[in-house]
Image (cartoon, rainbow, N blue to C red):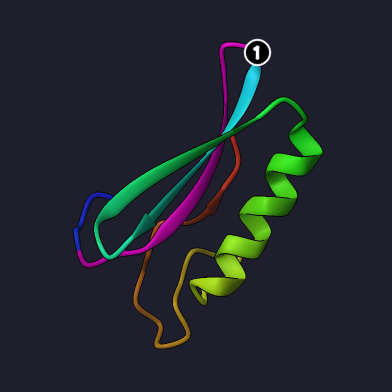
Amino acid sequence: MGDDQKNGVRVEPIDGQWAVQIVEDGVTTQQLFDNEEFARSFAAGQGIRLKLNRSGQSPSGDEVGGLLNPS
């Protein structure tokens, strides 16, 4: 999600919580959740709002950050 023209959503564990990081028009915001299921649900909704698909591509085929899961 490095290009400031790209959008993306990432979910990752941070200090016992789940962080949802949203990049929209190059601006990153973060929302913390205590529950992983709530975080993933919120992230999925943000992905829909940003018109991302699961493979991390916009409908135009441009590669974007996409919905990422922690490894």
Other residues around mark 1 within 10 Å, as few (<14) / some (14–19) / many (≥20): few
Q: Is residue 11 above or below residue 71?
A: below
Q: Is residue 9 left or right of residue 61?
A: right
Going 74% across and 52% down the picture, which residue do you hit? 41
Q: Quadrant of residue 48?
A: bottom right
> x, y (%) of residue 20?
55, 41
Specify whether 52 is left or right of 69.
Answer: left
Which stretch did the figure color magenta? Answer: 5-16
Location of residue 40 in the rendering, given as x and y in whole percent from the top left corner: 70, 46
Residue at 40% x, 82% y: name it: 61
User: Which x, y percent locates residue 44?
Assistant: 66, 59
Q: Nearer the viewer, residue 71 or 13?
A: 13
Q: Nearer the viewer, residue 65 or 38?
A: 38
User: Observer-nearest residue: 36 or 64?
Assistant: 36
Which secondary structure, mark 1?
loop
Amino acid type indicated by mark 1: Gly
- In the rendered image, which residue does mark 1 sit on? 16
The verdict on residue 70 being magenta is no
Residue 30: name its quadrant: top left
